[in-house]
Every structure is written in structure tokens, then in C-alpha cells.
Amino acid sequence: MRGNTSLVVRLASAGLVAAGLLASPALAQEDTIKVGILHSLSGTMAISETTLKDTMLFLIEEQNKKGGLLGKKLEAVVVDPASDWPLFAEKARELISVNKVDAVFGCWTSVSRKSVLPVFEELNSLLFYPVQYEGEESQRNVFYTGAAPNQQAIPAVDYLMNEEGVERWVLAGTDYVYPQTTNKILEAYLKAKGVAAEDIMVNYTPFGHSDWQTIVTDIKNFGSAGKKTAVVSTINGDANVPFYKELANQGIKAEDIPVVAFSVGEEELAGLDTEPLVGHLAAWNYFQSVDTSENEEFIAAWKSYIGDDKRVTNDPMEAHYIGFNMWVKAVEKAGTTEADAVIDAIVGVSVPNLSGGYSAMMPNHHITKPVLIGEIQADGQFETVWETPGLVVGDEWSDYLPDSKDLIADWRAPLSCGNFNVATGKCGGKGIN
Amino acid sequence: MITQRLFVAGLTPRIQIVIALLVGAAVLVPVLNLAFPPSSPFHVPNYMVALVGKYLCYALLALALDLVWGYCGILSLGHGAFFALGGYAMGMYLMRQIGARGVYGNPDLPDFMVFLNWKELPWYWHGFDQFWFAAIMIMAVPGLLAFVFGWFAFRSRVTGVYLSIITQAMTYALLLAFFRNDMGFGGNNGLTDFKDILGFPVQASATRSALFAASALALAAGIALVAAIAGSKLGKLMVAVRDAESRTRFIGWRPENVKLFAFTVSAVMAGIAGALYVPQVGIINPGEFAPANSIEVVVWTAIGGRGTIVGPILGALLVNAGKSWFTGALPELWLFALGGLFVAVTLFLPKGIVGTYDQWRAVRRERRLAKADLPSGPAEAGDVRIVRASSATSPVPQGGPEPQPAE
Amino acid sequence: MTKNHTILYLDGVSVSFDGFKAINNLSLVLDKGEMRAIIGPNGAGKTTMMDIITGKTRPDEGEVFFDGTIDLTRHDEADIAMMGIGRKFQKPTVFESHTVEDNLLLSMKGPRSIFPALVHRGSIGEARRIDEILATVRLEARRADLAANLSHGQKQWLEIGMLLAQDPKLLLVDEPVAGMTDAETEETARLLREISKTRSVVVVEHDMHFVRELDVKVTCLHEGSVLSEGSLDFVSSDERVVEVYLGR
Amino acid sequence: MRLLRALGLILLFAAGFGAPAHADEGELRTIIAKFATSKNFRETEAVVRELAATGDPAVGRPLGALADGNLSFRKSDGQVFIVSEAGGALTLLDPLSGGRSGEAASREVTKVRVNNSLRRAVREAIGALTLNSPDAGVRLSAAETMFRSPDPEAIDALDAAIAVEAVANVKSRMEEARAAAVLASDLGDSEKLAALKTIERRGDRTALSLLAAVKGRADGVLKGAAARSAANVRETLSAWDAAQNVWFGISLGSVLLLAAIGLAITFGVMGVINMAHGEMVMLGAYTTFVVQNVIRASYPGLFDWSLAIALPLAFLVAGGVGLIIERGVIRFLYGRPLETLLATWGVSLILQQAVRTIFGPTNREVGNPSWMSGAFEIGQMSITWNRLWIVVFAFTVFAVLLYVFKFTAWGLHMRAVTQNRRMAASMGIRTPWVDALTFALGSGIAGIAGVALSQIDNVSPNLGQGYIIDSFMVVVFGGVGNLWGTFVGAMTLGVVNKFLEPYAGAVLGKIIVLVLIILFIQKRPRGLFALKGRSVEA
């Protein structure tokens, strides 16, 4: 059934693109509300993003079962930006100006988001971005439903410091912007907490690094200096599996040197034998193992939709779940899908998250989330060992970076500014103009 | 005088038509985009302007590759590197144009440097606030890299597959280098969030149309340049080097200089293509250095027909239009289609679309001449015509020019 | 030394590839204006000797002088070609995707740098010279044909024509009549004799009839060094030559 | 985890040994009941310490269960049990006796939450109690734990254990633990000097940090001795570091060799630029995945044999696909190597997307069989079993290939065809057949490389992409058409990379290696093991 409809959708959108290539696309049908899905289905990022495309199709179908939105059915428009960053911009433009979608859910890497930002700004549309990222950004047309560094990294470090008594830190990451920024923030944070410079080791590796022998040995050596050591890992995607395999084989146990990761979720663990990794940690805002009735329902519905009992759920999926429901609620509140109205309506909207609370869209276009620290279990799931007592507000401008600590974002009128400087009282960074 | 002499050669009617088409598009598309309201059937939407503008930059890149591969026999698997370097030079200019409008409001440092705690602008970023300087760098950086790389490689007589692989190593090394945040080029995120170019907002329709026109004109100029080179004695020499390198050496030419010239000119063209590409897509990042991208350029050129001037342009336009269409229409299946296309073209159209068409036409003409059963006089005249065409569009003979890796 | 009056002077030249001595203490002297035929069984080092003379291979030891004074071991192929040594390969090597005329145009004596080539325009003198060469190598009728479409023998001639266009002092001609008909062979011999009136020529050839037709001094190489030298009759009556050709 | 489970049982058996204190059972149960009321990890940890302080070996069972995450309490009455899951329902076991005391649904009980520091606390708490365990491995880890957290009060217990210890390895670990304890005690200098020597003999980084600590707090003779010992240890360690780097290099080289050797055949010998080579590796890895899946589902006992079963299958699958590619595409393109590049690039896109469609885009789990898990030590160098096996495997594959090429009729045919196709054909060799089989062989080798790589890398549709460029570099660096060149090339690149990595970092190291290859090719335009002489250039 689903296969058929989506094929029809595909053919229809194919026709639309063709029409768009020929003449001005004035033929968009008005009986559905279109939602764009901008996730890579091929190339290096397909590994993470394909699930999110499925999640969105699932959410849209669920919403249509409930009667759609504003009395219309929702219609998904799927495109494949193929892990090619300029293609993201092209596809975003196509979704908005040719397919006339009202909102886009998509992107994973920071660079793909950066690539589409100007397009959303220019064409005044909406993007819901579901992945944890480095912060230092707030844009009027973008809603950041993943974690900012303060919703992931800093609580994790606090946990290790307080609960595990860690005194020596390895900050290991893939060499790109998210780890670099997060590690800068963490370094500043750790030093503020009195950690000496020689007790911090920073290490960067290329994307897809697969030979971890040297680095794991270095970590082992660094950790044998008599002080309790932990690794804070911002290692990205593909490189994680060989990293954890090497950790397990070199016999680094979580009790000796725990590794806390910000990019390893249930999906990544599905490719691993987790028995030797029990006790290593991850910090997220959601785990599949969270014990709430909302989550149970969500997982059951997801598994029956995807037709695979083994499929896991993860944090970015929850982010899309929250973001999608927020958009639905904001559209209902505004009574229209028109971008400006939705942007005004969505701030303050609060929807249930899957961990038993409510997440709210803040004026900075980030959302409130609980922070959970989980330990890897032998069955490939996480067990929550700690969580923040309340919800944490996503902080787009880090307090630990000198140039961003005075900035705030507030997209409500009259301020309506993404980089308001509280020191100078002006919009626009340092406020020199 | 000299330029005049240079440019008359090689301008066959076909190339004149393509140049005329491009110049026409450079005028017409902006007019249709700006002068007609979106509701008019004559309106060209912004989306199309941006898309086709991007394709034209790819076409210029493919043409640049064709100059070295089709005419000189150097299969570069690293041409994306020159494209990306030109793009980065333009990106650096555009970054400096942002000035204090970045999110941190720092007038000197781009945003990514601010939040990574850079204190001052690295030396190699100086000067890029001036367009003329950036424009020189757009050509000089890829040109210089190609010159230095080619100087060593061609002098050492690295040929064939070895050369292809080290060009790939070059672009791969640059990819890794530009990924490094310490390099000061924005790491994986690259350069983005551009505001102005030459004082005009990059997002504005008029600027987009102007960039489109610039791309079309640059491509037209590129075609004229390649046609002129191909039609000159040097062009003949390039083909000679491609077909029998040692022969040229034993009659006193230095093939390494010929290759170096072609490689450098081609790199500069690729750099210009990259520079025009960046403001139109709004981002430049290390992904452009990926070896897969460079291989894709080779594929466009092969599909269109290497050793012809129109072929690579046609190939670049067709493959990219196909990619745009497939990724929207058949997102799960498009790699099958693209992969199948590559296999089919190499198997069934080894000379590419234009090459095969030329061959078919030549065969048909021969047949017609044979049917007419004319004496030798007119037949010779016909031959002369073929000869003229072949100096600009030089079909690659099978087997001969290819490097043979296995010895 | 008699070096000064020679066009080509090789003394004690040796070269080895991975332990195999391709040329072993070879000495050869060619006077100005002389034509010399070189024979020898396969693997005797004939082609390697040509490689050394034209700068493609560097000898491990020994002296190689051109025109009495120029040390060829210090120059590369292009330099040597410009000094006036032309070489025809064993396998005919012409620019197949060019016309016969363009093949000659590219070989024409003149500046060999990039920018003159870019703005080059044919002159009347050049056209006349091309006509002359075409007449010499009997290819007037094929002037506008692609070289790829020539017969094997015609390619050989074209290659010789290309050497002539260079206006060399010394021609090295490697197996010019391989694969030719008898008539063509005869024609080629005539052509070479004509050329040798104005230039020095070294011909490597297996075909004894052809060598006889050339009627010049013959050098027989074996295992990288000179086995015998003299008139063809002298050489072919040399026992050692008979031995290496016919086996024991 | 398994270790702790075993340990709990052992403690029970060892109850009578060494006459440890026996606490009142009721008292123990009172303490255990506190697990149900502890609100956070700190409180739980206090309960653990309290239990351990009783010194009763019976606490081993509940503590072991706690560490394994099997300790729960009933919501209704707060009673603490060890739970074991069987078919949906939970069996409740008594925490002390281990006897069955009922069943419960999973909703009725709450797990006593545990984290790393708790597990560590449990380990330390029961460490001293396990010195007399009958299992040498348990004694070893007990000694190791005591070395890391030296306690002067444990000296007597250690002395007793050393006296009866028969396993040399365990004994020396115990002696080291004792030495560490001595250094932490207030014993005399002579005892401590001897202890320093013992620690120095141990010679690893933990010893070094201990020595540094002693140097910091001691004075007089002891300070000097500690400084000398530390210097000695540092010296031997740096030698071991170099050895370790060589090993890492060989290990990386073996991975490169495996990835590249199939390419050395298809590219080097046949002149086909096979861009789909990486996908052959990927197919091999997926074959391993499928084999393991079947084994997990149907024959779990065979799991340790899964790789052995996967090897021939991967060879056949990848080789078969290679054969199809050769017959379907490549045979039309001989003599046009650059066009094989384009066509195989297309094939690689198709294969990647096919795998993505069939198996999904995410990573697939390929387990390590037990004989490929863990590590062993040689001196101060730790060698992981999976790396060792991959090195052995790579060398074996290389040797077999060399043999096939040099000494079999097929190898002779292959060489004949690649050197002179027409001549070979006229001598009666069926050249198309040889071509097809050679290509299939190269692909098949890539497939079995995939089996090995599945043990250390992701099994995802992108697997092959990560290796293709490195493979080309190896083949070109080594010299096309020469298997030994590929071998030496792979090893050189591996070792150079690993020696650069500590100084330049992984990213810069890789860039430097690439630049070195580019420069090297200038010097030797045809690679390391190029043929010299006239035949090379036509």
C-alpha cells in the first residue's frame, strides 16, 4: 500500500520537477500540504540519514491517520541530496520553489545545514534540523531540535567529574567543526573547573579513520598516570565502530577508562558487539530504553510501520518527532502554513517528548530537553544512569567562548535578532555597526 | 594581430553556433528572469537560473579537463582540486566582504575563526578583501599548483596511469588538508554565509542573473580559447604528444613543456569555473576536493566525447541535469541509473555522444561520396573539409594514446 | 684523436639493465657524410645503441660524441634532435590522427618552444619545403590523408620524411624496410642513398638484400659489442658472424 | 562481567579458606535490604562498602549480581533479589543462598541501578577476598587491582598468597602488588628499596607513574633510587614504543596489503583500473555478515568457525560478481584501461546502491569470534589477537598468490596472456577464459580481504570507498605488475604512516604520506619495483 502511494508521490514530484525545468511552476496543487524531506539516501551520510527519512514518512502517515492538518492531507516530498553539500542547497531550492513545500525536515551534518541556510533565508521557508551540533548559530528560518553543546557535552563532563571522579581527560574527535567547537568549549570549561593543562589531551582524526591502534594505545598510556582518566569522544559516524572494536580488543574497560560519546546512539551500536563495551557512556536527550508510555507507543508504532522488529530508535528520531509535532501545533495555532505566521506562532509551543516531559520551542529557536547519560548494555541499548533534574534550554551561544558569551538570540518581536549583544545592547555580534 | 591570428583558427561553424548560443543565453536569460513577472509564461524562475548557472560552471570544468585529456592525453583525476582552489579563492573574497555583518560582528575575522578563538587573520587571508587580488589568486593559485606539479611530474616523465593516480593523490591530500581546521579555511564546513559580491547582494535575482551571464560568457570564452589552441600548431602538437609522445621528443619538441602548458591553462580555466560556481551555490567546502568529484568530471567528458569541444559541455549539462532530475524523482534508484549510464556509454558510445555523432556523419558522407562515384578531384576537396574539422575536434584513436599500465 | 672529423664517435660504451649487459664496451666511429649499415642478431644491442645516441638511455660508462665535440651523454632527446640527429623507430611511429602534411609541419625545422607554436602561421617557404619532402618520399597524393590511413610502407616513408623535415646531420634509421614489398624495399634503398648524399646515415637492418643494395660499410654487433666491420662481403665471410647467425 | 559472575561463585566455595570472618546472616540481609532504599549511586556505594566491611565471603554473590546488573527489588515490599530472565518472566533468587524464591513480571521489580564507579567499587571491595581463588585468572586480576590501589594492610594477606602461589605470572603480579603496598606503608627504607626494584622490573607505565609518585613524596636514599628506577623504566619503555610502532605499521600494512593485493592482480597484471574493487571488498564483508547471521540463528555452536566458513563463500561471491563484470563489461574494453575506469566506476555505484537496498544503509554487526578477541602482552607491548590474525592471514594470502603465479600452470598461462596476448592465444591458451578467471581471482581475493576487514571496520555500503584510494597508492607505489612491489609498498606505507602518526597526528601524517608518494613517483615514475630496460617504453 505504502509502496504504491509513495511511488505515485515520486512520479508526481518527478512530473513537477520536469514541469519546473520547462516552465514556471504555477501548477502546484492546493489540496495537500507538502512537507519536504531533505536527507541523504546515498553517499557517506546515507548510513545515518536514511532512518530519518523513514521517520518523517512515518510521522506524516501517523498525522494523516489523525486527519491531516488544517483539514488537508500532508504529502511528503522526498529528495536525495546524496551527501553532496552543494546539492543540498540545490535540492532545498527545488523543494521550496518547485515543489512548494511548506516546511522542510532535513540535514545531518553541519556543513549541509550551512549550505542550505541562505536558501531558507532567501526563500523564507522553514527548516527543522534534528541533530546535535556545535551551536554558535541561530537563524530565523531554522529550528534546532537537536542538542546544543550545553545540552549534551557539559552535563556529560559534569557527570564524569562528580560521579566517577575523573581528573584526566582525553578529548578525542574527528577533525571537523562540531568536535573542534565542542572541545574548545569543554577545554575552557574544564580549565575553569581547575583541571591542569597537562591533564587534558586533545586528539583529532580524519573522517572514516579506521586504524585506531596508535591512538587507543596513547589513550591507554595517558590513562596509566595514576589519575582517573576518561575519554570524551566526538568521533563521528563511521570511525566509531573500528574505534570501539580497538578499545574492546586492547582491553580498555569502562571501569578503568570510560568513554563518553556524543555521536554514538542505538543505530551506531547496532553495528557492534556491545558485550565488551558495557559501561561506556553516551550523552543524549533520548534513549530507546527510556521507560515511558509515550516512548513505548512510539517504538511499537515505528516497528510496525517499518516492518522490522530489530529496528532501533534514536535521539535524532526523537528530535524529528518533537520538531514535527511542534510544527503541526504551530500551524494549527497560526491557522496557516505561511512561514512568517508559523515562525511567530511556534515560539512557546510545547509538545510531549518521549522521555516523559514536555519540550518547548524557545525564542532562540532551540528547544528544551532533558539530558540523559546512559551506559552501554550488552543488548546494544543504553541504560540511563543519570539525568538532569529538569529540562535544559538549548544555549546557542556558548558561555565558554569569549566572543559568544555576550550574545543571545530572540526571534520574538520586537527584538527579532539571532545575535543580540547584551553588553552593547545591539543586534549584530559585537555591535560595531 | 597575434590574437586575431590565434582566434581565427579552429572556429568551426559548430563552435561558432555554440558560442552564439551561450552569448544569447547570457543576454536572454537575465532578461526573461528579471523583466517578466513570475506569472508570465516567459519568466525564467530563479531556481532555473541558479541551477543552469551551476551546470555552466561544471561545463567549463569539463572543457578544461578535455583540453588536457582529450587533446593532450593527460588523464587528470584531480581536476576537482583546481576547481576547488579557484572556488576557495573566491570564497575567501566573499568571506571578507561579509565584514562586520558576521554573527559575531568581528570586522576582520570570519565567523569560524572567531569561535575557534583565532586572534588574528592568517597571513594568507590578507589581500582577499580586494576583488582584483582575489581575481588574480583565482587564476594564480590553481595555475601555480598545476605548474609546479606538472613541472615535476612531466619532467620526470610520469605518464599514463601513474600520472592519473598521483593527480588523485594530490587532490586527496588537499582534501585532507582542507578538512583540517588548523588550516584556516573553515574545515569541513568550508566557507559559507556569503553576503555581497562586488557590493551586490549574492541572493538577489539581479546578481544571480549577472552571475549566470558571467558563467555563460566565461564558458563561451573558454570554448573560443580551447578552439583556438586546438586549431593552432600547438594544438596539433598536443595531439601529437597524446598519440606518440616519444616521436615528438625525437623530432626536437619537449612534450613536457607542451603538457605543462596545457595543464596550467586547464587548471586556470578550472579555477575560474570554481570561482563562478561558489557565489552561485553559496558554499565552498573540502568536499569539492573529493577524488570522486574529479572522477565524475572525467565521466562527463567521456560521455560527451573527449577530444571534441562541444562534447564535454554537452556531457556536463546532460549528466548534471539527469542527476538533478533523478535525485528528485527517483531518490532510491538514481545511483542505479547513473551507474548504468556510465557502463552503457563506455560500452556502446566509446567516443562519447559527439564523437559518435561525428563518426556517423563522416561515414554517411563517405557513403554519399562513394555513391556519387565522382572522380578524385571533388573527393579530395571533401577530404580537406574533414581535415579541417579534425584539427578542432580530434577523435581519439583507439588503443594508441592510452597509457598501458601493465608491462 | 680522430674524433674531430667524425659525425659520431662511440668509445667503450657499456650499459646494463638489472645485471644484463645490453651494450658491452662498444666502440663505433662514423665519418661525416658516411652511410653505415648495422646488422646483428636479435638482442645484439642495436636498438639500445640508438637509445644511447639519441639520449633515451644513459650509458653506464664510455664516451659518446656527436660532430666531434658534442658530448651526447649530457643531453636529452629533444636537445639531441635539435642538434641534428633524426631517428626513425623500428615500429613506424607517426602522428596517426594528423594528416600527412601536418606530420611534416610538426617536424619542420624551426623554433621548438610553446608560444611560437601557439601563434604559428604557415609561410610560403615552409609550404615549399613540405612539397619538396612530399615529393622525395612519394606521398604527394596522400598529402591531406590521415596518417592512420597510410599503408605500412607509406608510414615508414612518412617517418623518413619527418626526419628530413628536421634537416638533420645524422639519420638513425631502424629497420626501414621491415614489412615492405620488394618494390618498396628497392624504393627505400634508393631514397636512403639519395639522402646519404647530403647527410650521414646509420641504418639498422636485418634484410641482407637491402643491405647489399645500400652498398655501404657494414658493422655487425653481437652481445653488445662490435663483432666485425667492413664491406658486406667481408663481414658475411667472417666466421664469427656466420657462427652467431647460423648457430654452431 | 562474566568474570564477576564466576567470582561470586568462587567466593562461596572459598568460604572456608583462610578462615575469613563470618557475619550474622540476619545482619547481612539487613544491609542488603538497604539496596532497595538507596536513592543514588553514592548511597548504593555506601551499602557496598558496608557489605564488604563484614568480610564475609557470602557477600560475593549479591555484589557480583549487582555489578552484572542483576540485582533488583520488588516494588511491593522492597525485598532484594537476584533476578534471571527466562522467557519474558523473571525468576527471583535469594541474594545470599541463590535459591529460587519466586517469579515476577518485569514491571513488578526495579533494578538496583549500577554504573562504572559502582562496578569499580565492587571490584575493589571483593578484590582482597579473591586472592585465594582457585582460578588463576581471578587471582591475577585481584593482584592487579591491589597493585592499582595499594593498601598497606593487605601486605600480610599478600604474603600468605605469595607463599602458596604456584603460577609464576600470578606470583610476580602479587609480588608487585605487595611492593606497591610496601611503598605505601611506613616500613623501613631497605624494604622499600627492594620494593622499588620489584616495581622497576614490572616496567610498564603504571609502574612508572607509581615510581614518580614515590619520587614525589619520598626523600633521601629512597628519592634517588626511585628517580633512577623511573629513568630505567622510561628507557626500556621508549624502546618498546618503537617496537610497538613497527608492529602497528606491519599491522596497518597488512590491512593495506589485503585491500590492495586483489587490485595488484586486476590492475597490475591485467591493466584494468577497477574502481569497483572496493565494492568487492564490501561484498566479502557482507558475505561474512550473512554467514554469521545464519550461524547465529541456526547453529550458534559454530560461531567461532564463522570466518572459516565465510572465507570460501566470500571468495566465491566476490569472484562470481567479478566474473560477471568481466564477461559483461570489461572484456569489451581491453586495451582501453582508462575506459575500464569509467565503466567500473559505474559498476561500483550500482553495487553500492544494490547493497544499500538489500541490507539497508546502516552498519551491520559482524562479531569477533573468541579467538580474535582480546590481546596478549609481549614485554611492554600489547598485541591484539585480531590484528595478529590479520597479519598472518595477509601474509598467507600473499604467499599463496605468489605460489599460484610462479608455480602453477594457470599462473603460467596468466603471465603468458598478460605479457603477449596474441602469442599466448596462438599457443593454444584460451585467453578470454584466462582473462575472466584472472579477474575473478582478483575480485575473489578482494572478497576474502573483506572477511578480514569486517573484523576491524564498519560493515556498511561505504566500506569499499574507504580503501580504494589507499589500494591504488599501494599498487602504484610498489610498481604495477609486481606482487612483491605491492607487498613492500603496503608494508612501507604502513610503517611510515605509523611512525609519522605520533608526531604529526593522524590527519597530517596521512597528508605527508600522500605527498611522499607523489614525490617518490617523480623519482621512480614506475614505482618501487619497476622493470628496467628497453621493453618498458614502447
Image (cartoon, coloured by chain):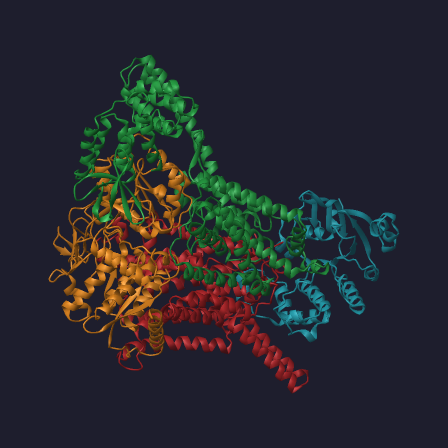
Chain colours: A orange, B red, C cyan, D green
Is D306 positioned to the left or the right of B177 in the image? right
Q: Is residue D154 visible?
A: yes
- The percent coordinates of residue C197 (x first, y second) are 77, 62
Q: Quadrant of residue B128?
A: bottom left
Relative to A85, residue D369 above or below? above
Q: Quadrant of residue B190?
A: bottom left
* A144 vs A10, nearest the viewer: A10
- The percent coordinates of residue D148 (x first, y second) are 31, 27
- The percent coordinates of residue C20 (x first, y second) are 70, 44
Q: Is residue D493 visible?
A: no
* B48 vs D100, nearest the viewer: D100
Relative to D463, residue B296 above or below? below
Is D41 positioned to the left or the right of A312 in the image? left
Is D24 positioned to the left or the right of B337 in the image? left
Is B405 positioned to the left or the right of A389 in the image? right
* D331 vs D90, nearest the viewer: D90
Name the image quarter holding the N terminus of chain C.
top right
Q: Quadrant of residue B130?
A: bottom left
Residue drawn at x 80%, y 52% as measured from the top left: C219
- The percent coordinates of residue D380 (x first, y second) are 43, 30
Relative to C187, residue D54 above or below? above
